[in-house]
Amino acid sequence: MQHRAALPPRAIVRAPSPSLVHALGQEDGVVIDLERARAQHAAYVAALAALGVEIVALPPLDAHPDACFVEDTAVIFGAHALVTRPGAPSRQGEAASVGDALAALGLALTVMHAPATLDGGDVMRVGKRFFVGRSARTNDAGIEALAAFARSVDRDASVVALDMPADLLHLKCDTSPLGDDAVLAVEGLPLDLPPGLTRIDVPRTERFAANAVAIGRQVLVAAHHPETHARLAAAGYEPHPVDTSELRKAAGALTCLSLLVTA
């Protein structure tokens, strides 16, 4: 029998447009340096490529200031993708072009419809278990749509809903997967992890580093967070620090900036 060669991991990314300076997550009085944000985004993409990830770059969307945060527009499960309906109305025009890109990569699409809303940043998949934050951006109908999607792909999939505190935009601000057998999480974050799953705690003083992108044992992690880097290394991971401090001003973290396709 002939077997298809395994595809390299692929990442959908979208460079910031000039409208990023009007991003939703910007606090009053905070000014985003567009050129610095673009340079940091390019360095992030280069770091992914250096780890063997094939880059699929979408054109900027000037009508959508937050469009570079592509993670919020889809949830990927194997060779399937749920195209979401982001919770901020101003972002709901971002998803269609991401869906087209996912379909071009061969993924089977399910499209979320009103009244459901869900941001991909609220969803952390660890194996067949989906942790999802009930937040200002993700409602109960969105969680139900995610559960139906997950079970349509694998009947053994499960969804665990968590209520997010008002000061937390997305679940993955405080946690992220390190493959199917480990997670990175801020100390004290309640997570009902299955037996056998490793949890690496991030000190609360380095909270931003809890959002990281794992490619096998290689991990893109926020720069300037040495204790988190040390804990990852001690657990057998190789941390690759990436500076996205300018994008952080728009409430963006590392997973926000790409959609990883590994099937």
Image (cartoon, rainbow, N blue to C red):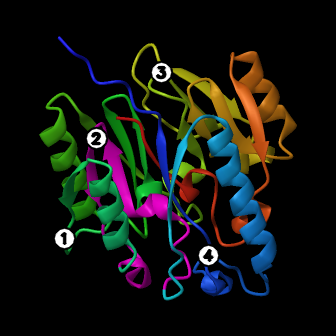
Q: Is residue 3 above or below residue 145?
A: above
Residue 243, horizontal then vertical, whole percent: 79, 54
Please give left or right for residue 201 compared with residue 226 in the image.
left
- Nearer to us of marks 2 and 1 is 1
Q: Which amino acid type corresponds to the residue marked 1 in the rendered image?
A: His
Q: Residue at x 49, y 49 (%)?
A: 11
How far apart marks 2 and 1 lie (CA) works out to 19 Å
Mark 4 vs 3, N-terminal side = 4
For the question of whether residue 210 can be seen, the reply is no
Mark 1 vs 3, N-terminal side = 1
Q: Which residue is mark 1?
A: 113
Residue 159's disc number: 2
- The quarter in which the C terminus is drawn is top left
- Nearer to us of marks 2 and 3 is 3
- The quarter in which the N terminus is drawn is top left
Q: Nearer the viewer, residue 92 or 187?
A: 92
Q: Which amino acid type corresponds to the residue marked 2 in the rendered image?
A: Val
Mark 4 vs 1, N-terminal side = 4
* Residue 79 is covered by the magenta coloring: yes
Q: Which residue is mark 3?
A: 181
Mark 2 vs 3, N-terminal side = 2
Please give left or right for residue 203 compared with residue 189 in the image.
right
